[in-house]
Amino acid sequence: MGGGGSSLRVCTDHRGGINWLSLSPDGQRLLTGSEDGTARLWSTADGRCCALLQGHESYVTFCQLEEEAAFTCSADCTIRRWDVLTGQCLQVYRGHTSIVNRILVANNQLFSGSYDRTARVWTVDEGQASRELRGHRNCVLTLAHSSPWEVPGTPRLEEAVAGGLLVTGSTDGTAKVWQVASGCCHQTLRGHTGAVLCLVLDAPGRTAFTGSTDATIRAWDILSGEQLRVFREHQGSVICLELVDRLLYSGSADRTAKCWLAHEGEHVCTFPAHRHSVSTLKYHAGTRK
């Protein structure tokens, strides 16, 4: 977008609302997932549709674009992997028994969360889940992954984080921390009085930040399960979060976005211009002349 808010490109080929979009790591392609049951790849240079990803039997809920593949999930209970050059479907991941809400790709693993109350771990090149994570009492809405890191002098924790950790947020009001290697629940993060809608991880600091329909953001130690602080300035559900260095950004149903000092819990500023809920946000560092 330009400084005056004018459109640079308009991509209009979908026949239904767009539920999610994902930008490629190099910024040259955009992936969109739609109510029309398709996903499309676009060139950001000229707005041209490069590929139509067709095969889902219901609407696309979420998508993620990687260097060599695109991933989509759907209300048809499946996840699909696509070739970004040809648009060919390379793999269908079956196993969930209800709408798949979220997917996340990291370290050649695929993670998914569903209305069937489970999260699942898949190997990207295989169609079968290697782990089924059960424990939530309601649907899994959001996911975050932490790669392995060292916990010096604490063998039990070293073992727990050896294969990485997955954090899931649910409409049951909790977030759970799972050991990816074993599939065991490491911690349950309790404190919210409403559904957990979004979460982000500061993996080096082993801290999770969760946003909820209770209008709060909460910070947690994902190894001990301790609640570290509560952010209370929002007047509506916290829908989205982004962590950039020491700053945490949040978007809410109260029509504002806010900026916080992540590790102090201090409210820095509010961006109040929206006329409706802030459903997603993205930080850009900009340029200085």
Image (spheres, rainbow, N blue to C red):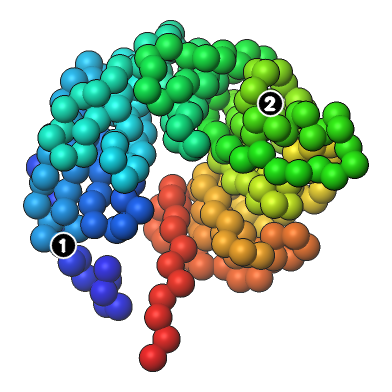
Task: Find residue 147 and report its horizontal and vertical position in percent.
Answer: 61, 40
On screen, residue 109 above or below 84: above
Query: Front-most of 124 and 18?
Result: 124
Q: Which residue is mark 1?
A: 45
Name the side, left or right, on which 258 lies relative to 88. Answer: right
Name the side, left or right, on which 173 lies relative to 64. Answer: right
Quadrant including the N terminus = bottom left
**Does the rendering let one see residue 215?**
no
Distance (Cα) linking label 1 and label 2:
41 Å
Amino acid type at mark 1: Ala
User: In the displayed image of the protein, which residue is found farthest to the bottom?
Assistant: 289
Task: Find residue 193 and report its horizontal and vertical position in percent.
Answer: 71, 33
On screen, residue 161 above or below 273: above
Task: Find residue 26 and report its horizontal and vertical position in percent.
Answer: 31, 57
Q: Which residue is mark 2?
A: 179
Choose top left, top right, bottom left or bottom right for residue 287. bottom left
Choose top left, top right, bottom left or bottom right for residue 149. top right
**Does the rendering let one see residue 255?**
yes
Amino acid type at mark 2: Gln
Residue at 58% x, 57% y: name it. Answer: 243
Query: Front-most of 141 and 107?
Result: 107
Please report contact status of discs 1 and 2: CB closer than 8 Å, yes or no.
no
Choose top left, top right, bottom left or bottom right for residue 197. top right
Residue at 37% x, 14% y: name it. Answer: 127
Query: Front-most of 79 and 209?
Result: 79
Task: Find residue 119 and report its horizontal and vertical position in percent.
Answer: 54, 20
Q: Secondary structure at mark 1?
A: loop
